[in-house]
Image (tube, rainbow, N blue to C red):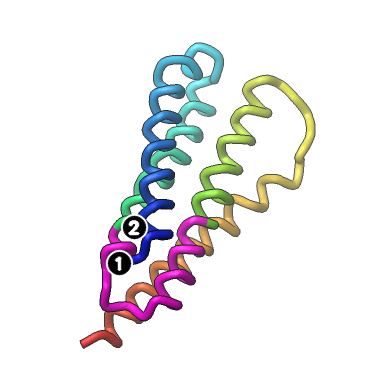
């Protein structure tokens, strides 16, 4: 059991629910349908990878160091992928200018998700 992975998974799942409700009840009144769809993508990916963190925290067969590396990739992916989508939607939705290079964080977060899934699969294959 990995407490950091379980705590991160719980935190990100909770905030995904809060952000999803915020989007459904408030942001739909100020965001265009296109922005709302982007925001919902961030929430979905955050929730999916929160469950991955929870699974990882319960998967006791992995070496502790590998659990922490994989958990770090999932958590970093959530922050960069979903977080950058949230900020970009906010900036576009409020017509504010700035952080033009922020869009590069989204694919970096996506690569972190892919790396975490590959590492997790390799660890499962190595386990007995």
* Circle 2 crowding by C-alpha within 10 Å: few under 14, some 14–19, many from 20: many
Q: Position of residue 89 (x, y in %)?
A: 59, 31
Q: Secondary structure at mark 2?
A: helix
Question: For the point 56% across and 35% down, which residue is it?
Answer: 86
For the residue pair 118 and 13, the one nearer the viewer reads as: 13
Q: Nearer the viewer, mark 2 or mark 1?
A: 1
Q: Residue at x 55, y 14 (%)?
A: 30
Q: Quadrant of the C terminus?
A: bottom left
- Write down the residue under mark 2: 52
Query: Residue 4: x and y, percent?
Result: 43, 59
In reply to whether residue 60 is colored magenta, the answer given is yes
Where residue 59 sits, quadrant-wise, is: bottom left
Report which quarter residue 95 is drawn in.
top right
Q: Nearer the viewer, residue 69 or 87?
A: 69
Q: Is residue 101 left or right of residue 92?
A: right
Disc 2 from disc 1: Cα separation: 14 Å
Q: Is residue 43 left or right of residue 98?
A: left
Considering the whole magenta stretch, tell me its main secondary structure.
Answer: helix
Q: Please state, as top left, top right, bottom left or bottom right, where the N terminus lies in the image.
A: bottom left
Residue 10 on image: x %, y %: 36, 46
Where residue 54 appears, x then y in whole percent? 32, 56
Q: Which residues are magenta?
A: 55-75
Q: Is residue 33 above or below residue 63?
A: above
Q: Which residue is mark 1?
A: 1
């Amino acid at each position: 059991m990995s407490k950091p992975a379980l705590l991160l998974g719980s935190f990100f799942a909770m905030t995904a629910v809060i952000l999803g409700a915020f989007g459904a009840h408030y942001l739909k009144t100020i965001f265009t349908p296109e922005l709302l769809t982007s925001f919902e993508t961030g929430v979905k990916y955050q929730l999916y990878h929160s469950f991955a963190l929870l699974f990882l925290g319960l998967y006791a067969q992995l070496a502790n160091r590998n659990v922490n590396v994989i958990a770090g990739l999932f958590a970093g992916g959530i922050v960069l992928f979903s977080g950058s989508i949230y900020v970009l939607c906010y900036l576009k939705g409020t017509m504010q200018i700035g952080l033009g290079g922020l869009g590069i964080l989204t694919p970096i977060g996506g690569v972190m998700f892919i790396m975490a899934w590959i590492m997790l699969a390799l660890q499962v294959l190595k386990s007995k």
